[in-house]
Amino acid sequence: MSSSMLFNVTMVIYMVSTCIFFAFLASRTKAVGLAGTYAALFGFLVQTAAIGLRWKESYDQGHGHAPLSNLFESVVFFSWTIVLIFLIIDFKYKYRAIGFFVIPFALFGMAWAQLGLDSGIEPLVPALQSNWLMYHVITCFLGYAAFAVACGISIMYLIRESMEKGGGNAQAGGLLSMFPSIRILDDLNYKAIMIGFPLLSLGIITGAAWANYAWGTYWSWDPKETWSLIVWFVYAAFLHARITRGWVGRRAAILSVIGFAATIFCYLGVNLFLSGLHSYGK
């Protein structure tokens, strides 16, 4: 069995997990929510095996590098990190409804990678031939994944707040009964960003060290570097406003969504629409 086949299986499992979480919201049955979590866990394990197999395939073809070097591999790894962060939060707090707002991010990533991107394994360009590749990519994408989870939680917050203002909480046993409370959602959003922010910071630091190794300068204001700094400032502003100004609730949720939109542009928009030193990421 090839890694491509396992990635296809992963995509299907994440689709099943998303459907189960939808059924959980509709049925309000705890066993269904648990099934959604275990489906996501199964998909995560299959995807882990697929990433390991692709790594082996790289060595078999004589390239011998971690599967983190092109857009296909980065999207697959991004999906993997999203599910990892989700599972950590899910098993710790057991708010299953979050899965319906987070697992689709991983599903869309896998679907795009499998259906729209070139999955060929190619040799590394000279700039990527460094151990800094793994340090930089892993820390960045774990940070991105935490921001994706925070975005999903923030969407839940905004939906719950809107429904409560419209009298939705008067419906006993309704959809809102499956959502964590406003206070808990706000706290989870903050905790997810507290996970992601130091990881993004490490990603920027390792990226600067890698840039110095590859190009002889720590910072060159390349579009990717500039947007990474913008994303860092957005989340730094989030944490500063929360800690010093008491920003909670709707404003924090909206800023979290904006931050993730900036993250996606930094990750994909820069590579696809702007030219620079990171253009090999296309």
Image (spheres, rainbow, N blue to C red):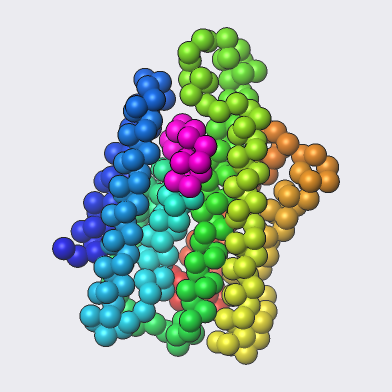
Q: Nearer the viewer, residue 187 or 212?
A: 187
- Height in image: 213 above or below 264? below
Q: Is residue 38 magenta?
A: no
Quadrant of the drawing holding the N terminus = bottom left
Instruction: Say left or right for 68 vs 149.
Output: left
Q: Residue at x 55, y 32 (%)?
A: 156
Q: Residue at x 62, y 32 (%)?
A: 184
Examine the rendering and report whether any part of residue 114 can be seen.
no
Span highlighted in magenta in the image: 86-102
Q: Residue at x 53, y 49 (%)?
A: 148
Q: Indicate the position of residue 141 as horizontal and vertical percent values.
A: 51, 61
Q: From this viewpoint, which residue is outermost toward the front?
A: 92
- Height in image: 112 above or below 274? above
Q: Quadrant of residue 168?
A: top right
Q: Quadrant of residue 277?
A: bottom right
Q: Indicate the position of residue 12 as horizontal and vertical percent values.
A: 26, 46
Quadrant of the drawing holding the C terminus = bottom left
- Height in image: 45 above or below 274? above
Examine the rendering and report whether any part of residue 255 can be seen.
yes
- Height in image: 6 above or below 17? below
Q: Is residue 91 magenta?
A: yes
Q: Nearer the viewer, residue 19 or 43?
A: 43
Q: From this viewpoint, which residue is outermost toward the left?
A: 1
Q: From this viewpoint, which residue is outermost toward the right?
A: 244
Instruction: Say left or right for 142 vs 9.
Output: right
Q: Indicate the position of residue 167 as horizontal and vertical percent values.
A: 60, 12
Classified by dominant secondary structure, the portion drawn in magenta counts as: helix
Q: Indicate the position of residue 134 as horizontal and vertical percent values.
A: 47, 74
Number of callouts: 0
